[in-house]
Amino acid sequence: MFKKFLSFLIILSSVVASLTCAETDSSFDKNKRTLVIAHRGASAYLPEHTLEAKALAYGMHPDYIEQDLVLSKDNHLIVMHDIYLNSTTDVADVFPDRAREDGHFYTIDFTLEELKKLRVSEAFIMGEDGPQAKYPHRFPLWKSSFQLSTFEEEIELIQGLNRSLGYDIGIYPEIKKPYFHHWEGKDIAAIALEKLKQYGYINRDQKIFFQCFDAEELQRIKYELMPALDMDIPLVQLIAATSWGEKLIQVNGNIQNYDYDWMLEQGGLRKIANYADGIGPWYPMLIEIQDGKPRANNVVRRAHRRHLQVHPYTFRADPEKLPEEFESFNHFLHFAAYQLHVDGLFTDHPDQAVNYLSRGNRKQHQQ
Ligand code: CA
């Protein structure tokens, strides 16, 4: 009798364990809130990638805060989006003679000490009448005082706030254009991974995703760099349109755009699932328009079948950036979370995304 009861208990506990396991293993649990990733910090409200924008994002309580990474001349990881300094700093005034022949001021040509002398502004586009704000309604150009920061400074800010405020907010670093860094004789992937290890991000117990647009570099990270460092952090394959020139390759001495089309074609996601845990597509790649209305295409479903999380970019509430198919930012968020069933999303407006998605209002979006 006792033996029977014992074996019943064992069976019961294994059933409970498998249920629990199934629950935690499922990245696609429809009851789980869509992850909010603060894109370049609270970049809708303060100049992108500044520590101030990251602190503000932190206070908005997203799940992750994003870092784009570029190397300096002396191999420091600088948190910034472009490989150039032209559109967010006063480099042209401080170091007027340091542009390359193409007119760009490259971060990789400056030491950290030099980069710290630059003033950072809200993003601008240089026009004939001087700098024009990239987003006219955001933080004004050249106001207050902001600096470039290193990856260490940002990790210490987030880890410090995790300690002082008690949240567990993750990081979501992206190495920018590894092909360019290789051409310059630098290995940004290896430097970034070593830095992560130094700060305790070594496996899936820490809250981190590591993203890149470069499929070959991600495979190098998965199969060579991480095993050598005894690391295993989740990787996200970002997906670009081929025409953007996000990755350049040399073919027979000519430079051309890397072809991204294979990623969403037959067999592409299966290949990605071998080395990555998720994809980061541009949101229009997930949508088709029928009778003027947005509908999910099959990409999210196919990705989930391969156990890939889907974290599209970039959700912006600025009226001029709202896709015309949606009547409000909440409508856009609602569609992504409850019709596309994405697992997370990158947003410049983490406060609005956290606020809307935490309501769990599945039936209808609220204005
Ligand atoms: Ca990014």
Image (tube, rainbow, N blue to C red):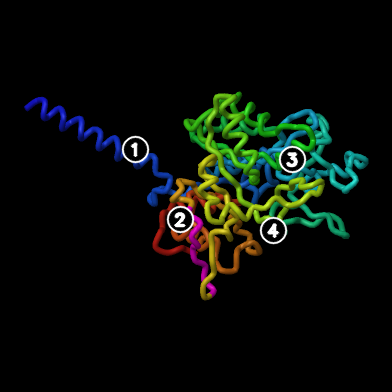
Label 2 CA crowd tier, 10 Å (few <14, some 14–19, many 20+):
some
Residue 88: horizontal and vertical position, in percent? Answer: 77, 46
Q: Give the residues in magenta.
A: 292-302
Marks 2 and 1, how far apart in space? 22 Å
Asked if marks 4 and 1 touch (Cβ < 8 Å), the reply is no
Secondary structure of residue under mark 4: loop
Residue drawn at (76%, 56%), measured in percent from left and top? 133
Queried whether the magenta region covers residue 152, the answer comes back as no
Marks 4 and 1, how far apart in space? 47 Å
Does any atom of ligand 1 lie closer than 8 Å to the CB of label 3?
Answer: no
Residue designated by label 3: 146
Pair 2/3: label in front: 2
Furthest residue toward front: 252
Residue designated by label 2: 301
Marks 2 and 4, how far apart in space? 36 Å
Place residue 324 in its image quadrant.
Answer: bottom right
Residue 143 in view, yes or no: no
Going by the numbered disc 4, the residue's amino acid type is His
For marks 2 and 4 on the same chain, the one whose residue lies earlier in the sequence: 4
Ligand 1 falls in quadrant: top right
Residue designated by label 1: 21
Residue 235: horizontal and vertical position, in percent? Answer: 55, 39
